[in-house]
Image (cartoon, helix red, strand yellow):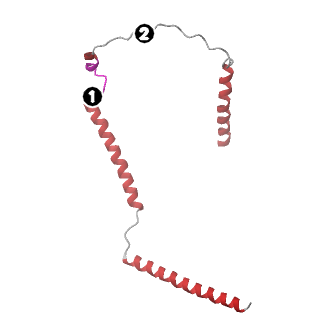
């Protein structure tokens, strides 16, 4: 169903430029003549009328907008910090440190043992040539 819907939308999107192209005249036809209307004269308004009109926001509305923006920013910061704290690594306890040290020692011991076995097998291969 989703494939059919997607295909239908794609076909519709491809058909739009064809319909628009069919409506226009030849692209090589001359341009229509420019209109010759006179330029309108600008009207002069006094400065006192525009300032007393009160077309902007009132002071209390501006305060509410800025307070809402501040609350929004604080909410975003709180969400980021709380998520970071939940994912951050915790301090290691003494048992975790001891466990990590035992693992590291075990890995070192295995490496030494594997290297010694590899060395013995290389020497054995050299003797049997």
Gap in angstroms between the C-alphas marked 2 and 1: 34 Å
State the extent of the magenta-drawn residues as a range. Answer: 50-56
The quadrant of the image that shows the N terminus is top right
3 relative position to 84: left or right: right
Q: In this view, does 19 lie above or below 126?
A: above
Q: Examine the image and state in which quarter residue 46 appears.
A: top left
Of tags 2 and 1, which is closer to the observer? 2
Residue 1 visible at all? no
> On the rendered structure, is 108 left or right of 93?
right
Residue 61, percent from left and from top: 29, 32
Residue 73 in view in this figure: yes
Total marks in image:
2
> Which residue sits at x=38%, y=60%?
85
Residue 127: image location, x then y, percent: 70, 92
Local secondary structure at mark 1: loop
Q: Mark 2 points at which residue?
A: 40
Question: Residue 58, which numbered label?
Answer: 1
Secondary element under disc 2, as helix, strand or loop, is loop
């Amino acid at each position: 169903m989703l494939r059919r819907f997607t295909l239908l939308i794609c076909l519709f999107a491809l058909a739009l430029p064809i319909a628009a192209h069919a409506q226009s005249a030849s692209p090589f036809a001359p341009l229509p003549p420019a209109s010759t209307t006179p330029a309108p004269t600008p009207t002069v308004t006094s400065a006192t009328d525009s300032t007393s009109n009160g077309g902007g926001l009132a002071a209390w509305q501006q305060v509410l907008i800025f307070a809402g923006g501040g609350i929004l920013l604080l909410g975003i910061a709180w969400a980021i910090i709380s998520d970071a704290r939940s994912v951050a690594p915790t301090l290691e306890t003494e048992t975790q440190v001891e466990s990590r040290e035992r693992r590291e020692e075990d890995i070192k011991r295995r490496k030494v043992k594997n290297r010694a076995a590899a060395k013995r097998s290389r020497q054995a291969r050299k003797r049997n040539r």
